[in-house]
Each structure stands twice: as structure tokens, then as C-alpha cells.
Image (tube, rainbow, N blue to C red):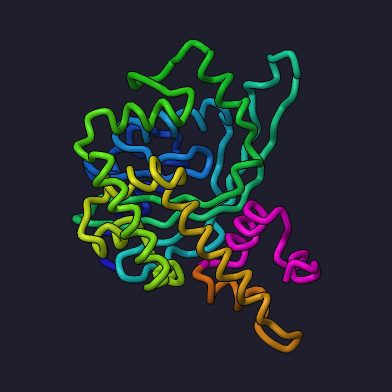
Amino acid sequence: MTKNALAIVKQYLKSWIDHDPAKIWGCFHKNGVYIDPLIDTELIGEQIATHAEKYFTAFPNLSFEGVGSISESDGLYAVQWIMRGTSSVLENTASGKIISIAIPGADFMMIDQDKILSVQAYYDHRAIPSSLFSILDNKKSTSILPGSYSRSEQMAKAKYSKSALIPEKSNEIKLKIMRFMKNEKPYLGYDFSLLQLANALGQSTNHVSQTINTEMKQNFNDMVNTYRIEAAKKLFQNRTDNQKSILEVAFEAGFASKSTFNIVFKKQTGMTPSQYISSDLT
């Protein structure tokens, strides 16, 4: 854990705590990406700042409570947090609803040359209604940054409009991804990242990311989690009453914490791990 890398991680976290979209964006490498479970595509450039600003507009009192120290493994930095806030957007709509959130989550960051190459955020995005950001899209923008988005499909179209990746090449990368994931099972390592996948395939992160988005209809986060949850289900199926706790299965399947495992498992199966164990599906 280098001093400079740790400093940029702390600066990034502080920028979120300070509600400063420009500084959040400034922590990233020029080709850096932000992967958020609330949307289904990676964000680059000023899209990162614009997306962060939407959180702060939706939840003016948004806060992040750290639940652990920053950990590092092979250049991947991980930090867990609880995101709390109260919406002030929906209270003026016909529904009159006010949304309060208290969502546990985690960030996994790849650092290079004292800048962030990628951030993969994990949390249960269903706790934030999609209508909330749709309302923000229809409001007059007060953003300090130009441009916004209303749908992830529009973002993906704009992001890849000038891409040199032709369909034949994209399909070739897709097949390489699928073979690599099946044969090497890299997702079993909690620190597996988009950058590591791209390096293993000998491709750029942008092309690998684009292929996952357009050909596999997922983002990197969801793709990896799909493999991990399938691995966990097999572990549960082969489990006896005296073997492997849920935490042990979570770690063996590639998750860095039990809380993240529980969130993702329920998101993909509709059940908690305990409910799955008790069901006939195992």
C-alpha cells in the first residue's frame, strides 16, 4: 500500500463526503471508469461528476459512514461504508413521498500512477427508486458541468459512438471473455477487476467494457457477480450441515465481505443465502 495511492483513495472518499463532484472526477485517470449498480453501464470523464451530483441533489444530506479500514491487495483498494440520506425531491411530487436510505456497500478501486483507473461500487440499488433520478432529469439543471443523461442506453450510445470496435471484433472479445471466465475462474479472487480482465485478454479496458455492455447486456460488476453467485450456489448444493458457513462460501466464491455477498445474492436469486439453503433449490 503506497503512500501516494492511499492518499488518492482517501481524497476520493473525502470528495464524496464533501459533496464535491468536480474533485471526485479529478481523482480519476483520464481513461478511468466508474461502475455503479444504479445504472447498467460504466461512466467515464465528466459523466462521473454528473452522476455524483445527482446523488447530492437527490439526497442533500447524503453521508458515508465508514465501517472498516482501507485494505489493499495487488493494487486493489477496498473500503466498506454505509450510505445514508433523505430525499428532498419526491416530497414535492404528487406522491408526496420522502425517501430515506441507509444502505451498506463497498468500493473497490484500482490505482495507477496516483490516479484511479476504476471504481466498482457495490450496494443494493433497489433501495433507491429509479423514479428519483428520472425526476431529476426532468428538472432544470443547476449542474456546474455540461450535459446529463436520462437513460443508461443513451449514455452507452454516446459513449461508444466514436468507438473503433467493430461488431466482429466485439463478438471475438465476448467469446474470449466467456472462455477465460469458464476456464480460469478469475472471479473467485475478490480483487478481480476490469483492468485485470483486459490485461489477461490483451485488450483495452474500453473495448472489454464496451463488449460486456453491448454484447453481454451487463456491466462488469454484474457479469462477475453472476459467476460468483453461481459458484456460491454450487458450494451450497455440495454443502453438508457440518461444512462451510455462509461466510466461508462467500469468501470462496470471490466476495470480500458477507454483507456484500448477502446483497448480491438476494438481488440475483430473490432470496437470502439462509433462505436459499433452506429451500429445495439447493
- Residue 88 horizontal side relative to residue 9, left or right: right
In the rendered view of the protein, which quadrant contains the N terminus? Answer: bottom left
Which is more toward the observer, 102 or 173? Answer: 173
Q: What residue appears at the point 60 percent right and 63 percent down from the top-left corner?
A: 261
Tell me which corner region of the image, top left, top right, bottom left or bottom right, holds residue 99: top right
Furthest-top residue in this view? 140
**Predominant SS along the magenta part:** helix
Q: What residue appears at the point 29 percent right and 53 percent down from the top-left corner?
A: 173
Tell me which corner region of the image, top left, top right, bottom left or bottom right, holds residue 232: bottom right
Q: In the rendered image of this protein, does residue 162 appear above or below residue 90?
A: below
Tell me which corner region of the image, top left, top right, bottom left or bottom right, holds residue 47: top left
> Can residue 174 be spotted in the picture?
yes
User: How many numbered discs?
Assistant: 0
The percent position of residue 75, horizontal first and vertical second, equals 30, 65
Which is more toward the observer, 166 or 79? Answer: 166
- Residue 18 horizontal side relative to residue 111, left or right: right
> Can residue 116 be spotted in the picture?
no
The percent position of residue 146, horizontal first and vertical second, equals 33, 19
Tell me where the magenta segment starts and ends, as one range. 255-282
Furthest-front residue in this view? 168
The percent position of residue 32, horizontal first and vertical second, equals 28, 45
Q: In the rendered image of this protein, does residue 44 appear above or below residue 77?
A: above
Q: What residue appears at the point 46 percent right and 59 percent down from the top-left corner?
A: 224
| Magenta span includes 126 | no
Q: What residue appears at the point 69 percent right and 15 percent down from the top-left corner?
A: 93
